[in-house]
Each structure stands twice: as C-alpha cells, then as structure tokens.
Image (tube, rainbow, N blue to C red):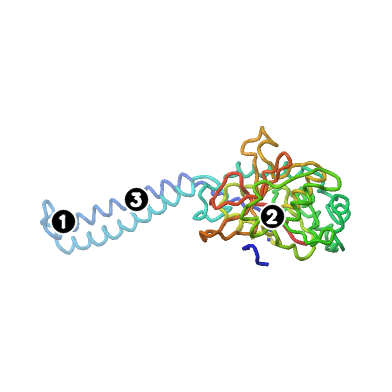
C-alpha cells in the first residue's frame, strides 16, 4: 500500500521426468521420414515439370507422388522437430516455479537450492525467545516500555494455529510456533499513538532490556511519508522470524505474489515488521534479519524483508521499503527501487 492509505499453500516443486530413449528415437525417426517424404515430393515435382531423368514420368503419377510425399513428409518433419524441441526443454531437470518467469531476473531455484533455503529458514527461526508458548504481549510491553491499554483477545483457536504445520516448511513436524513470533502491536504506548517515529524514541531508552536505534531513517523519505502513520487498532500478529525460503533475490512483484499465495498471510507493514524484530532484540538480544557483521562467517548474511508500503518520490517512481540488516543495536529502515537484491527477501505476517 502507499503510505497514508489506510494464503495455506506449500511450496510445490515441479519436477519433469526426462523422456525415454525410445521416445527420443521415435522423434528422430519422424524427422528422417519427413525429410524422405519431402524428397519424394520433390521428385514428383521434377517429374511433373519433366525435369532431368524424371522427364518421362507420367504426370498423374508425378502429381500423386508430389502430393503424398510432400504433404506427408512435411507433417512428419513438423511433428519430429516440435516434439524434439519440447522434449529438450523438459529434460533440463527439476525446477521450482516460485514466480512468474517473465518477472524474474534470476533463474528459478532448483530442488537442492530450495532445500538449503529451507534449512536456513528453520535455523534462523529457531533463534530468540518469542517462540513456542512465549509471546510479547501487554505484560511485556509494560515491562519494557509502558502502558498499552487493553490487550485484545487472541483467537479461540490460537493453540490450533500455533500447533499447525508451518506452511513454509516441507517438514510437517515443524509447527507455526517454531517459526513465527507472536507479538502484540499496540495502538498506543503510555497514552501516545504508536508510530514509526514513536517506536524509534522508545527503543532508544527502554525501562529495561537492550537499547536500539534506527539506521537510514532520519531525514529519509520513509520518515517524511510514514513516520507519523498510526497503528490504528491494537492487534496480535504472527510473523515469520526469517524471510521465506527462496524469496531472496526475487523481484518486488514476485515477492508480493509469493506471500499472497498463502491464505491469511500478508507482506508486513513497516511498523509491524519493525515492532516484531525489535521486540525480540529488546527482550533476548537476538538479531533477527541481521547484518553480515552479526554473522561474519555466513555468505550474503545481511537480510532485509520487503514491507507493504511504497513511497511516492518527486520523480513519480514508486520506492519500496525494506527493514532489517540488524546489527550492533542498529536497525535499518531502507528504501529501494532496484528490481532484485540478493539480501532482500520477504517475511510473511498473519494478523489475528
């Protein structure tokens, strides 16, 4: 959404079985027969026009040879070529159709790459304290920051939700409670509207716990356009503790489409993502969506999540907002117009 304006599906791996040698030979034979038929048709044409050694051929026979040989040969040739080309395309091995190919500047992940992405996802979501039966609600807000008013009730089936298989893991033993954090996003803190600007003030000086601060935010277009946007209504959210497997490097449009394919899930708003990631750090000191300095041994370790909002600049180009690269108590709120970036993926958020 533009600042100021205020599903359950598993990743499916499409694997193509390579064609049998018998089919391949059959397509080649069709090409050979087709070429032979065209040759026969050519001979018939030569006889019809009385060319060379076939000048004495009866014209009726020549017409039959030209029509049957040429027409049949052309049909066999087309079948052989088309099927062979199609067969070669299907023989490139398994791939993951995780987004529209016309919208993606990178090749789709193969099964091995996606498996590694899922392993990383599971490892990163295991961190911190806001997981399992733990949550960051009214009591935690009051401990670290202050009064947040009445806590909205959780859904009656919250236990079923938390104990259901995580839709982003191929392992059914991995539950939502293992990969998500359950956090209250309050409308107010100590009687003041919770905004990005207000959150930035709160994290600098909590009543206890760790301090943090924004990076790239002061004097930014994000602050100008979104800094005073109100939360509106207090709500509970479930957000993944890492970007979705395979989402890094996808185009902005494809990342949004990926999340929309999962029932009840959305791309998080800036404030929602920021609150979830920062509350985990304030409470446990865990860097989620961290920068390379926090994980120096990990390649491409910096991680951002795309956010829902887009910004309007004077150039009329839409800029997307991303948050993360969290390190040494600095939390980045950044904008991008680049179609793909290797360190930017997308988290998924469910509003309860």
Residue for badge 2: 348
Q: Is residue 121 left or right of residue 55?
A: right
Q: Is residue 155 above or below residue 136?
A: below
Name which residue lies at 32% across and 51% down.
33
For disc 3, the neighbor class at 10 Å (few under 14, some 14 to 19, many from 20) is: many
- Sooner in the amino-acid sequence: mark 2 or mark 3: 3
Tell me the SS state at disc 3. helix
Q: Indicate the quadrant containing the C terminus: top left, top right, bottom left or bottom right.
A: bottom right
Spatial distance from mark 3 to mark 1, Cα to Cα? Answer: 23 Å
- Is 258 situated left or right of 286 in this image? left
133 and 14: which is toward the camera? 133
Q: Earlier in the sequence, mark 2 or mark 1?
A: 1
The correct choice, above or below, for 120 with respect to 346 in the image is above
Dot 2 crowding, Cα within 10 Å, few <14, some 14–19, many 20+ = many
Residue occupying image coordinates x 60% and y 50%: 13
Q: Which numbered disc, 2 or 1, marks the residue closer to the eye?
A: 2
The kind of secondary structure element at disc 1 is helix
Q: Nearer the viewer, mark 2 or mark 3?
A: 2
Q: How far is mark 2 from mark 3, CA to CA?
A: 51 Å
Looking at the rendering, which quadrant does residue 266 occupy?
bottom right
Q: Position of residue 95 (x, y in %)?
A: 55, 48
Which one is in front, 81 or 350?
Answer: 350
- Residue 143: x and y in percent read 88, 50
Name the residue beneath numbered marker 1: 46
Position of residue 58 in the picture relative to residue 323 (left or right): left
- Quarter that holds the N terminus: bottom right
Q: Which disc is residue 31 wearing?
A: 3
**Distance from the alpha carbon under mark 2 to that under mark 1:** 70 Å
């Amino acid at each position: 959404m533009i600042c100021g304006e205020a599903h359950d599906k598993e990743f499916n791996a499409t694997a193509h079985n390579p064609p049998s040698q018998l089919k391949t030979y059959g397509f080649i034979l069709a090409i050979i027969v087709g070429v032979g038929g065209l040759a026969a048709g050519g001979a018939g044409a030569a006889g019809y026009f009385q060319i060379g050694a076939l000048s004495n051929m009866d014209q009726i026979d020549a017409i039959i040879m030209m029509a049957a040989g040429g027409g049949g040969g052309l049909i066999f040739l087309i079948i052989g070529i088309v099927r062979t080309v199609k067969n070669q395309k299907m023989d490139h091995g398994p791939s993951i159709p995780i987004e529209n190919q016309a919208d993606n500047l990178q090749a789709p992940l193969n099964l091995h790459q996606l498996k590694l992405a899922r392993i990383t996802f599971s490892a990163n979501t295991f961190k911190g304290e806001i997981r399992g039966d733990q949550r960051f609600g009214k009591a935690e807000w009051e401990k670290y920051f202050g009064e947040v008013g009445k806590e909205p009730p959780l859904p009656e089936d919250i236990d079923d939700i938390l104990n259901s298989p995580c839709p982003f893991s191929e392992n059914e033993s991995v539950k939502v409670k293992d990969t998500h954090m359950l956090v209250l996003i309050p409308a107010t803190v100590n009687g003041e509207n919770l905004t990005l600007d207000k959150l930035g003030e709160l994290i600098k000086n909590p009543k206890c716990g760790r301090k943090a601060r924004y990076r790239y935010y002061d004097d930014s277009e994000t602050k100008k356009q979104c800094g005073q946007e109100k939360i509106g209504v207090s709500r509970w959210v479930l957000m993944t503790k890492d970007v979705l497997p395979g989402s890094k490097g996808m185009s902005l449009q494809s990342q949004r489409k990926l999340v929309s394919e999962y029932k009840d899930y959305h791309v998080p708003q800036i404030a929602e993502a920021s609150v979830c990631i920062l509350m985990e750090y304030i409470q446990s000191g865990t860097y989620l969506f961290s920068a390379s300095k926090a994980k120096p041994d990990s390649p491409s370790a910096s991680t951002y999540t795309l956010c829902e909002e887009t910004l309007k600049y004077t150039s009329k180009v839409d800029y997307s907002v991303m948050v993360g690269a969290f390190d040494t108590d600095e939390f980045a709120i950044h904008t991008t117009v680049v179609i793909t970036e290797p360190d930017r993926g997308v988290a998924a958020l469910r509003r309860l």
